Amino acid sequence: MRSTTPSQDLIRGIWKENPVLIQMLGLCPALAVTNTVKNALAMSAATFFVLTCSSILISSVKSLIPKEVRISSYILVIATFVTLADMLLQAYAPVQHKELGAFIALIVVNCMILGRQEAFSSRNTVYRSLLDAIGTGIGFTIALLMLGGFREILGIGTFFDIPLFGPDFEPWVVMVLPAGGFLTLGFIVLAMGYHEERKKARAVREGASA
Amino acid sequence: MNERLKSDEIEVTVVDPEVQQEPEESRVSTLRLVATLAIAGALAGLLIVMVNLHTKPIIDVYRAEQLRLAVYEVLPGVTNYRTLYRVDDTLVSEVPAGAKASDFRQAYVGYDDDGDLVGVAVSRGESGFADVVLVIFGFEPDTGIVLGKKVLESKETPGLGDKIFKDLDFVQQFFDRPQTPLKAIKAGTGKGLPGEIDAITGATISSKVVVSIINNGVAEWQPLLEQVNLEQTLPEEAQ
């Protein structure tokens, strides 16, 4: 952990260790509520809030938490912030809150958040934990927006509620259903894997010719 | 700030081995474990209560507003309404002392500009294709004619079952004054009877649930409403 620089802490989570697309963490909300861009954005915002607040709090009180009860303490902290996010969303974004339903409360069990606390915030300074949380949060947001974007365009024919195609567009309904989430995620991961393979192959070829 | 944090980290690495090496301290340690969680829990509770105090009024206002809009929507022509509370099996205008309004099922009696009774709106939930479908609907208490309906909560399948509130042709049927008991039929097979509702193709279960909610709701509330004089009481200003 000590070998990374602060900027690496920030950037790492965005793409190279993207929580959803690379680490495959936090897939439940990533699949369940990304049928539209708006829902994806609301879920990302709520998760971002919980992740950042939990990381700051846990990294600042880490010396006070005995090792034996650390996991329960982390869950307690996370659950508290989730409850706050739930109440705030309900008060200020009631429409999105209704759409996301139970999945707001389920942020508690998003293993991406607990994972960052156990792997990073409990061992690093507040400043670096904050950077790590922001990076991971942005990575999560990017993944959810990709999923939400594809699914909304194909499944409803709109992007951020703006109609893209003419009235003749026949919505591909399965894309906004749970199955569409799995399909879309599968194709995104496939595309990323293919891209990585190509990059590696190119590097090998260049290495051989040099 | 950095210095303080560094000293915190050092403390962690020093304290932990001590706990493990000295068994006589395990008693203290247990106490500390419990204390840590208790204090953290208390602080968390405090924080939640504080935020809840702030957000609850906003949420309640929003909910009341949504309900108010829904009542006006399912009772076309209504300009104000009063709320009746169902206490045991009678309807009363006032909540019994010491009880909360939300503990009782409610009927909303709607009046037009002249103070004449238009109809009564009630809400009812029944199991749909996915989870409970909650519907508020308006009807004439004496004739049982449906005046309108609105789905308040539903997790029905997007693209199919959610047509019970997205398909405007389906919704419109409930505003065309159908006579209860309603009957969900396959679209196009109607015989022109007054209670026929064309079900949505591909969402028969969801359509039937809406119809069943309204039929059961009317059957449940009509006898109760007969016991109270809805006309005579002057309508209160809707809040």
Image (cartoon, grey):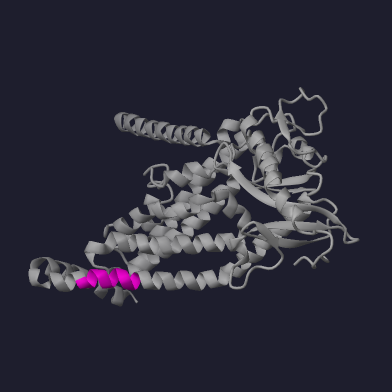
- Quadrant for the C terminus of chain B in the image: bottom right
* Pick the front one: B224 or B213: B224
* Pick the front one: B88 or B105: B88
* Pick the front one: A109 or B57: B57
Q: Quadrant of residue A132?
A: bottom left
Q: Residue furthest top?
A: B189
Q: Residue furthest right?
A: B114
- Quadrant for the N terminus of chain B in the image: bottom left
The reply to whether the magenta stretch includes residue A120 is no
Q: Residue A125: where, in percent of width, then height?
A: 32, 67
Boundaries of the magenta span: B31-40
Q: Residue B147: where, in percent of width, then height?
A: 80, 45
Q: Residue B210: where, in percent of width, then height?
A: 67, 39
Residue B86 position (above or below residue B123) = below
Q: Quadrant of residue A126?
A: bottom left
* Pick the front one: A80 or B213: B213
Q: Does the image show residue B153?
A: no
Q: Quadrant of residue A28?
A: top left
Image-based side of B185 in relation to B8, left or right = right
